[in-house]
Image: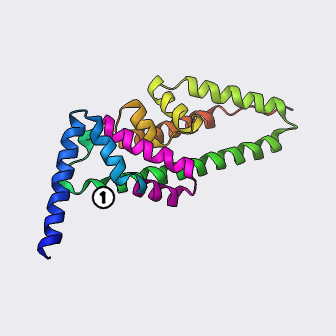
Amino acid sequence: MDVDSDGCRRLRQESDRLTATLLRAGDGRALDGLLDRDGRLLLATAQRITCDRATAEDVVQDVVAGLWRRPETYDPERGGLTSWLHMRCRGVAIDHVRTRAARSRREHNLHERDLRTYDDGQHTIDTAFVVRAALASLPATDRALIELTFLGGLTYRAAAESLGIPLGTVKTRVRRTLAVLRSRLASNPPNPSP
């Protein structure tokens, strides 16, 4: 490695450390400088994944807002700030795409179900009551997770941030809660109309 590239690397590391320190101190100018420096790269990354400019802008905003709210999540000793932001942006963009795909599948499934049950309105009403009763029987925290993720369309990551709990906890609790719901619905299925 030549002296110039080594010097540039050291300057970039120092710049990242200074930016991290200023962000932890709540200095908004550091955030503005970061957006000036890396904003276009982040937007390009997000747009390449989401294939939608508005969604890509939302992704960048989520990443930058997350760093602003919790600047301690970036550790300059573990790597460069641009790389860290790029990876966060990539992850959030993928979550947005997955959420959009899941929402589309849910809407398609609801439409298909509506077509199948159109002539069986009473059975649909009975099913809705049974499902609502099963949801109401859940502890409030578990019900909130199901409502945020399945009814509200949030990703697990967004639900974790919204509730202020770890992502792994959200995944575990949703998996467990769905198993409980399946069990309750299997033991108390709705009665189809005669």
Say which residue appears at 49% left-offset and 36% top-offset.
Answer: 177
Tell me, yes or no, whether the highlighted magenta stretch contains residue 51: yes
Q: Residue furthest left?
A: 3
Say which residue appears at 20% left-offset and 33% top-offset.
Answer: 25
Please give left or right for residue 109 compared with residue 164 in the image.
Answer: right
Which residue is tagged 1? 83
Please give left or right for residue 34 compared with residue 154 in the image.
Answer: left
Q: Which amino acid is tagged 1?
A: Ser
Quarter of the rendering containing residue 11: bottom left
Per the rendered image, the range of residues in magenta is 41-70
Q: Does 48 sit above or below residue 98?
A: below
Which quadrant holds the C terminus? top right
Please give left or right for residue 115 compared with residue 177 in the image.
Answer: right
Query: Crowdedness of circle 1 by 10 Å Cα count: few (<14), some, many (20+)?
Result: few
Decide whether the magenta segment is chiefly helix, strand or loop. helix
Residue 182 appears at what percent x and percent y? 57, 39
Q: Does 108 sit above or below residue 83?
A: above
Which quadrant holds the N terminus? bottom left
